[in-house]
Amino acid sequence: MKILLLGEYSRLHNSLKEGLVSLGNEVIIVGCGDKFKQFPVDYFINAKICNDNKIANFLFKSIRKVTSVNFEKIEKAIRFYFLLPKLNDFDHVQLINSDALETYPFLSRFLYKKLFTKIKSRSLLVCGDEAPVIEYLLKKEMKYSILTPYFENKSLKKQFNFPLKYITSEYRKTFNWLKENCQNLITSDLDYEIPMQQMGFQTTLIPNPINTDKIKYSPLKIENKIIIFLGINRLSYLKKGIPFFEKALEIIQRKYPEKVEIIITENIPYNEYISIYNKAHILLDQVYAYDQGYNALEAMTKGKVVFTGAESEFLQHYDLNENEVCINALPDVNDIVENLSLIIESPDLILEISKNAKTFIEQKHHYKTIANTYLKTWGF
């Protein structure tokens, strides 16, 4: 099998590639690397002229202020267009989402149409913001969501332009076109599966693949202080509810100055991010979630105690009634402080959750098992 994976935002496609390759398939990833995270791809289509050339960068930014024309998006489209001749003879293509090329929607559709004349078997993965997901969240039927800060303070609208762009006519048109031209709609966790189902879409939930051979479990040792890690991505600062973690950590630092060490990073490349959090016992991920995203799952694989989404829907879906695999982080500073305090004062609980997390990942997210599920879903 020769498989094309288009786009990369979280390392999901890299892990899926590793699983597919281990099963004897040939896999190519095309993408932009997701800005500062710098995820590896086989063909890089990010804007270089607009970013690397200072004169061009200044010129294009100046033009953008006057005309709103984004030359980075145009350059990405051009780079993909000239890459098309190399994208022949693939048995299947999967898009990370409808904006996999990170260009203007009308250019996306033009390029997808050209690509799809070559590849007849296609899937659209919903593992982040997407038109039906955002439309459902705007109904406010969930007790909280990534849009909760926007609902509470409409002056934040500019900071939510990225998710809200998916409900504009052009982005909706692209999603609708892909829905009609892809054989499969796949979701990666309940935060996307629930909205897609509620909006009436037929989807297949396939959990995120985690390479447990590459990401090693390391038994936690508490020798001195308990280390708490918070990695901040400014682009998703409000969507992930980071202010709740920041306020909780201020309280924890004052409450346990001799017992904890707090590490906070901001907007650093993926590999650097991983190397820094490796020594942590506890990782703070996000609060507006029902299920775990890729960042949380990787940390759980390493045996970290992760504060993330673990709502009742998640517990029910995976039949987790007894063994706690992570901490359900709510948009409530006092609740976060209470849970952190409980763990800090009960170090044995850290070791217990760490082991449970490792077992959960191996049973539900093993990259080879998940890769095989993808192949079956694709019809191979």
Image (cartoon, grey):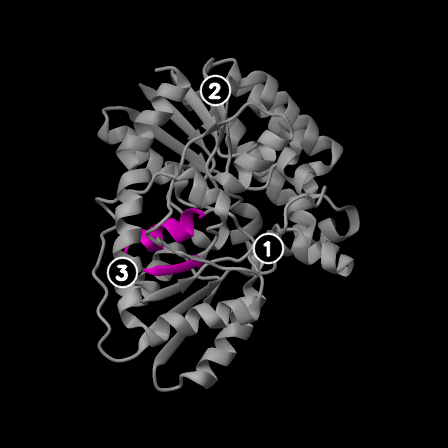
Q: Mark 1: few, some, or many residues within 10 Å (few <14, many ≥20)? A: many
User: Is 261 left or right of 129, judged from the image as shown?
Assistant: left
Q: Is residue 26 visible?
A: yes
The image shows residue 257 at horizontal and vertical percentages of 40, 86
Q: Given this view, does label 3 or label 2 mark the residue nearer the observer? A: 3
Sequence-first tag of 3 and 2? 2
Question: Is residue 338 shown above or below 86?
Answer: below
Mark 3: secondary structure: helix
Three-letter amino acid code at the position of disc 2: Arg
In magenta, the rendered stretch is 292-307
Q: CA distance from mark 3 to mark 1?
A: 30 Å
The residue carrying mark 1 is 239
Whether pointer 3 and pointer 2 mark residues with C-beta atoms closer than 8 Å, the reply is: no
In depth, the one of 323 and 68 nearer the eye is 323
Whether pointer 1 and pointer 2 mark residues with C-beta atoms closer than 8 Å, the reply is: no
Question: Is residue 222 shown above or below 53?
Answer: below
Three-letter amino acid code at the position of disc 3: Glu
Report the residue at 69% width, 49% height from top. 161
Q: Is residue 88 visible?
A: no
Quarter containing the C terminus: top left
The image shows residue 104 at horizontal and vertical percentages of 65, 35
Residue 122's label in the rendered image is 2
Three-letter amino acid code at the position of disc 1: Lys
Report the residue at 23% width, 54% height from top. 217
| Quarter assignment of residue 103 | top right
